[in-house]
Image (spheres, rainbow, N blue to C red):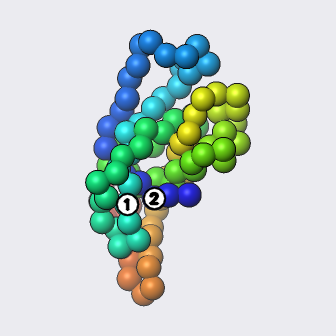
């Protein structure tokens, strides 16, 4: 899994029929120190309901298709959780409470 920040949404009116009704988010990946990386990913969010600026857990590759609602769909990344806190060593690098 990877940690990422939701930085937008992706809308596509023309897509594979199996993707109709799917919500897609534009994510910016985050390193182990909480720094935004210059890497982006489009991920499906079939059930979590993540929003703009939230930190999320992303499952990638074949594991992304193990989530209910993603089976038999051409999906490489799926949001599987909204992060409340991240602690590295003795330092808290992210807390959802501090951002809202």
Q: Along the horizontal axis of the image, is 46 left or right of 95?
A: right
- Residue at 64 percent across and 27 percent down: it is 73
Mark 1 burial class by Cα count in 10 Å: few <14, some 14-19, many 20+:
some
Towards the viewer: 11 or 94: 11
User: Dot 1 lies on which element?
Assistant: strand
Q: Judge whether residue 76 can be spotted in this image.
A: yes
Q: Position of residue 26 (x, y in %)?
A: 37, 39
**Which quadrant would residue 7 be assigned to in this image?**
top left
> In this rendering, is residue 98 above or below 55?
below
Q: Which residue is mark 1?
A: 30
Q: Position of residue 33 (x, y in %)?
A: 35, 73
Which circle marks residue 79 in the picture? none
Measure how far apart labels 1 and 2 are at the Cα level.
6 Å
Quarter holding the N terminus is bottom right
Q: Which residue is mark 2?
A: 3
Q: Along the horizontal axis of the image, is 61 left or right of 28?
A: right
> In this rendering, is residue 73 above or below 31?
above
**Which quadrant would residue 37 be assigned to in this image?**
bottom left
Q: Position of residue 65 (x, y in %)?
A: 66, 39
Q: Position of residue 68 (x, y in %)?
A: 69, 36
- Residue at 50 percent across and 58 percent down: it is 2
In this view, the residue farthest toward the bottom is: 90
- Residue at 61 percent across and 19 percent down: it is 18
User: Dot 2 lies on which element?
Assistant: strand
Towards the viewer: 45 or 64: 64
> In this rendering, is residue 2 above or below 42?
below
Q: Judge whether residue 94 can be spotted in this image.
A: no
């Amino acid at each position: 899994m990877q940690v990422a920040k939701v930085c937008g949404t992706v809308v596509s009116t023309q897509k594979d029929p199996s993707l109709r009704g799917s919500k897609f988010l534009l994510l910016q990946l985050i390193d182990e120190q909480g720094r935004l990386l210059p890497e982006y990913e489009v991920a499906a969010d079939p059930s979590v309901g993540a929003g703009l600026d939230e930190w999320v857990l992303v499952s990638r590759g074949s594991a992304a298709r193990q989530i209910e609602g993603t089976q038999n769909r051409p999906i490489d990344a799926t949001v599987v959780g909204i992060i409340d806190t991240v602690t590295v060593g003795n330092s808290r690098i992210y807390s959802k409470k501090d951002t809202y």
